[in-house]
């Protein structure tokens, strides 16, 4: 069919359907001026609405896909890493209220020692579970005195705490080794910059605390005690 044989209405109809998305945004008066029927105008309006709706839907879908791809999943965001296992440095600190169980009371127990019962803190319990036989610990008087007064030794590994019916709680046995020549008070520990990161300063409420080798040596120096004496005793055993 030659172009000259196409009727004007056919041209207008084909033109309207081909350029529907563009013509739909023209003012109605302009559409009528190019002699499109009201039916074509209404059709174009409906097509424009569908076109806009579909376009927005695709845009929202693309935006959602981008967000889901870049945003971390809820499980990965809220999942906490497993705690690192506690490794014994060989040195600890045990807190006790002297009016309940003092250094003198532990000395009176002799070589049999005493179970360190009554601990109801998970981190303190885990610290005791990490202890090895022969690990040394400072004996600290809490509430009254607030000072490190002696050195004790772990003489029995972690076992169930007999003062509790809950199997959750464990304890170790400790025995007195040596009284310090000079007690080291909490104020002196806090004033020493070498002990700024010591658990006695940063985690005061924890009843069983780890002590680093450097902190152990520094506290012994402050107490006017040579820790090599204990090392020599261990070698003789």
Image (spheres, rainbow, N blue to C red):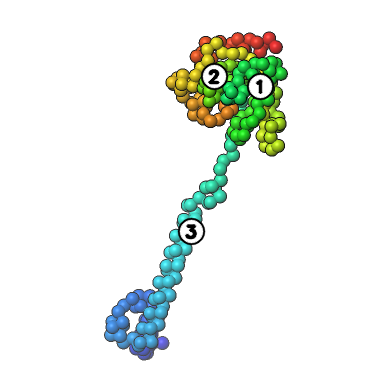
Label 1 crowd bin: few (<14), some (14–19), many (20+), radius 10 Å: many
Q: Residue furthest front?
A: 99
Residue that mark 1 sits on: 174
Q: Which residue is tagged 3?
A: 65
Task: Reply above or below: 57 against 105.
Answer: below
- Mark 3 closeness class: few <14, some 14–19, many ≥20 residues within 10 Å: few
* Badge number at residue 110: none
**Badge 3 element:** helix
Mark 3 vs 2, N-terminal side: 3
**CA gap, disc 3 and disc 2:** 61 Å
Instruction: Work out whether residue 128 or residue 228 is closer to the camera in this orientation and state it.
Output: 128
In this picture, residue 108 sits left or right of residue 24:
right
Q: Which secondary structure, mark 2? A: strand
Quarter-of-image position of residue 181: top right
Distance between the alpha carbons at the discs numbered 1 and 2: 16 Å
- Residue at 68% x, 25% y is 115
Residue ID at (45%, 66%)? 58
Nearest the viewer among 192 and 237 is: 192
Instruction: Report the front residue among 1 and 25.
Output: 25
Q: Compared with residue 71, is residue 222 higher up or lower down, i.e. above or below?
A: above
Question: Which numbered disc covers residue 148?
Answer: 2
Tell me the quarter of the image containing the C terminus: top right
């Amino acid at each position: 069919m030659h172009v000259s044989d196409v009727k004007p209405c056919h041209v207008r109809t084909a033109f309207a359907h081909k350029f529907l998305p563009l013509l739909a945004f023209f003012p109605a008066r302009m559409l009528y001026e190019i002699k499109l029927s009201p039916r074509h105008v209404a059709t174009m309006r409906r097509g424009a609405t569908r076109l806009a709706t579909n376009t927005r839907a695709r845009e929202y879908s693309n935006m959602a896909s981008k967000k889901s791809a870049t945003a971390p999943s809820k499980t990965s965001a809220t999942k906490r890493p497993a705690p690192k296992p506690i490794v014994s440095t060989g040195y600890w600190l045990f807190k006790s209220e002297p009016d309940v169980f003092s250094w003198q009371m532990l000395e009176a127990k002799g070589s049999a020692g005493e179970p360190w019962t009554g601990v109801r803190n998970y981190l303190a319990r885990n610290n005791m579970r990490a202890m090895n036989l022969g690990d040394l610990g400072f004996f600290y008087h809490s509430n009254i005195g607030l000072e490190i007064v002696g050195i004790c030794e772990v003489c029995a590994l972690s076992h169930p705490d007999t003062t509790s019916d809950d199997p959750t709680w464990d304890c170790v046995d400790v025995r007195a080794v040596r009284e310090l020549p000079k007690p080291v008070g909490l104020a002196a520990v806090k004033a020493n910059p070498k002990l700024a990161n010591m658990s006695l300063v940063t985690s005061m409420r924890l009843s069983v605390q780890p002590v680093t080798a450097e902190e152990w040596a520094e506290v012994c120096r402050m107490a006017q005690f040579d820790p090599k004496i204990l090392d020599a005793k261990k070698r003789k055993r």
